[in-house]
């Protein structure tokens, strides 16, 4: 038995025969040609055909994946229609007197390299899309129209890397899981395999041609691949997979159903995400919206301050993909355990009580305004709510709102369209709970961050594992603080949600409903289990909510 490691894209188990896939490698004709017009016509015809094939893949993806994941093929078709890129290819054909395939290979490779060298991991991952469409044009030019996977038995596919086009061409019913040596969590291939619910391990460096035809197991929970597993391991992972299948089947029945109790009380169930690569999970788990987009992960995944345009691209992608669903984007909550080196935040005695979140934003206003401008620009593309973290006073809220207003005015003067948006705050400190009435007068919603609220109510460092015996998440003081927040919010006509981990604690769902909570935002995998519990609760013995 061999055990290999990698990065898991989706929790799940796949068991089956491994098939090594190798992308067709073309021999590019590098000779000098004389029939330039002929090559240009070949190029035009091939691009047209490649566009048609991408549109075909879009329809195929709609059958096997979520609509949002399928959109990548529309984006590919648009890239192929790009006149500048086509002109670059034509210039190589005419200027260097080369074949259409030589020019396509060179122009697309150069463009992919430009993306590859960008600092931002999301933009880097786009180079894979460029290489994908290059392969598609070469397939047409060099005549490879073969069926991608003429398999007759289900397999685990192992490849150096897989393009989104190759992934969706796979016959889903025959595909159990994917292993790649390369690949990134942000790639569209990863997004697609999540949305196709395929256990997938990327960056599996030990992958080897000798695996071809052997029995393999993907353990997505532990980011492991087993080749020729022993009987004991195989039996235990087979049992785990069967349990998963039962759970998935049961939960799929709840898809599309309302989050409504037996007595007819409805509540919104949203998902927490760390970035656009989690969008597929929001859709796959049927969340009604995003209750917490932790925007600081964009900063943490970056080597330097993310620019306004980079951030705009992320927010726009999330809003557009999920529209008309509400997406609550929390402004940068850095500091304490989340530090980016380039921010030079310095060491502190008590980081959890230190220079963090809104405190950084209100003192480094240029940095904050970059994010606010990106958010406001993105607001034109979907249903946005902007949420400020760690607020302790009305003064702070008003300062943040004032900066937001200044940014809006600046953008409007620049002629940039700004859409509608809600403005709310996280309730994470006892100070916010006690000032909830005054704060509610100044915003559209509250979202209770029970992770920090518990830490500050109980004076227990959430990072210190040794303090866990004292960390009573059901402590009456925490529950009372939640109740007080909900009541204050409702007195002023605003909605109140919970986006901390406690929102997914199913033993408290009824308690929260009885308190009158309007929304619970939980990790995507908890959405359907939460819906199941909500639908089993009866609040009829209670006075009106
Ligand atoms: C919280 O504090 O409950 C919360 C949701 O924010 P984070 O966990 O990101 O601090
Ligand atoms: Mg918090």
Image (cartoon, rainbow, N blue to C red):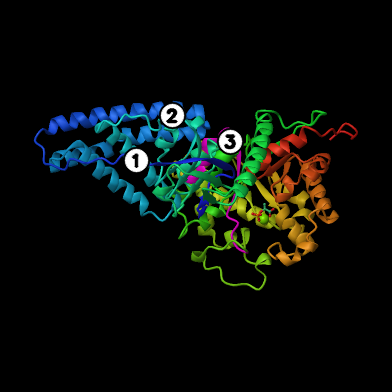
Q: Which mark is residue 68?
A: none
Mark 2 = which residue? 58
Q: Is residue 403 above or below residue 336?
A: above
Mark 1 element type: loop
Q: Is residue 494 left or right of residue 47?
A: right
Q: Residues within 10 Å of mark 1 (few under 14, many from 20)?
A: few
In front: mark 2 or mark 1?
Answer: 1
Q: Residue 28, image x and y in percent?
A: 21, 41
Residue located beneath label 1 in the image: 23
Does the residue at mark 2 contact the one at mark 1 (Cβ under 8 Å)?
no
* 2 or 1: tag closer to the N-terminus: 1
Give 297 or 424, whichever is nearer the viewer: 297
- Mark 3 and mark 2: span between their CA atoms? 17 Å
Residue that numbered label 3 is attached to: 283
Q: Which residues are magenta?
A: 313-336
Tally the marks: 3
Residue 390 lies within the magenta run: no
- Residue at 29 percent across and 34 percent down: it is 139
Label located before the other in sequence (3 or 2): 2
The answer to whether marks 1 and 3 mark residues whose Cβ atoms lie closer than 8 Å is no
């Amino acid at each position: 038995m061999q055990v290999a490691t990698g990065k898991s894209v989706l929790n799940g188990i796949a068991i089956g025969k491994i098939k090594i896939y190798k992308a067709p490698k073309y021999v590019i004709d590098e000779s000098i040609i004389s029939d330039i017009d002929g090559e240009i016509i070949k190029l035009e015809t091939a691009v047209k055909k490649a566009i048609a094939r991408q549109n075909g893949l879009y329809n195929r993806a709609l059958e096997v994946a979520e609509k949002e994941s399928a959109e990548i093929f529309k984006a590919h078709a648009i890239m192929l229609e790009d006149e500048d890129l086509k002109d670059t290819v034509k210039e190589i054909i005419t200027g260097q007197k080369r074949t259409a395939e030589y020019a396509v290979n060179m122009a697309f490779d150069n463009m992919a390299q430009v993306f590859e060298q960008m600092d931002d991991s999301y933009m880097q991952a786009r180079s894979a899309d460029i290489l994908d469409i290059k392969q598609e044009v070469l397939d047409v030019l060099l005549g490879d129209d073969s069926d991608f996977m003429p398999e007759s038995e289900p397999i685990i596919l192992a490849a150096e890397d897989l393009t989104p086009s190759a992934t969706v061409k796979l016959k889903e019913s025959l595909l159990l899981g994917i292993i790649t040596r390369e690949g990134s969590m942000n790639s569209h291939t990863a997004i697609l395999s999540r949305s196709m619910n395929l256990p997938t391990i990327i960056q599996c460096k030990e992958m080897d041609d000798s695996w071809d035809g052997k029995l393999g197991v993907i353990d997505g929970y532990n980011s492991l691949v087993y080749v020729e597993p022993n009987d004991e391991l195989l039996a235990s992972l087979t049992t785990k997979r069967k349990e998963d299948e039962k759970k998935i089947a049961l939960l799929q029945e709840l898809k599309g159903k309302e989050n409504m109790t037996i007595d007819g009380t409805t509540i919104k169930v949203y998902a927490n995400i760390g970035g656009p690569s989690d969008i597929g999970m929001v859709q796959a788990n049927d969340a009604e919206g995003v209750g917490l987009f932790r925007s600081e992960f964009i900063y943490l995944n970056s080597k330097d301050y993310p620019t306004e345009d980079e951030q705009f691209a992320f927010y726009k992608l999330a809003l557009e993909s999920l529209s008309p669903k509400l997406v609550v984007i929390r402004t940068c909550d850095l500091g304490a355990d989340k530090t980016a080196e380039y921010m030079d935040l310095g060491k502190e005695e008590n980081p959890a009580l230190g220079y963090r979140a809104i405190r950084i934003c209100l003192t480094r206003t240029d940095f904050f305004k970059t994010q606010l401008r990106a958010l406001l620009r993105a607001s034109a593309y979907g249903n946005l709510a902007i949420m400020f973290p760690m607020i302790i006073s009305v003064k702070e809220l008003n300062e943040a709102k004032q900066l937001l207003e200044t940014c809006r005015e600046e953008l409007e003067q620049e002629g940039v369209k700004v859409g509608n948006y809600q403005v709310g705050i996280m309730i994470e400190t006892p100070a916010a709970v006690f000032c909830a009435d005054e704060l509610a007068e100044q915003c559209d919603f509250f979202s209770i961050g029970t992770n920090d609220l518990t830490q500050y109510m109980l004076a227990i460092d959430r990072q210190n594992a040794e303090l866990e015996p004292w960390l009573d998440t059901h402590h009456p003081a925490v529950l009372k603080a939640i109740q007080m927040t909900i009541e204050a919010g409702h007195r002023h006509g605003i909605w109140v949600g919970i986006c901390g981990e406690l929102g997914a604690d199913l033993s408290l769902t009824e308690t929260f409903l009885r308190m009158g909570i309007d929304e619970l935002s939980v990790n995507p995998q908890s959405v359907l289990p939460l819906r199941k519990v909500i639908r089993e609760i009866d609040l009829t013995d209670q006075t009106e909510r």
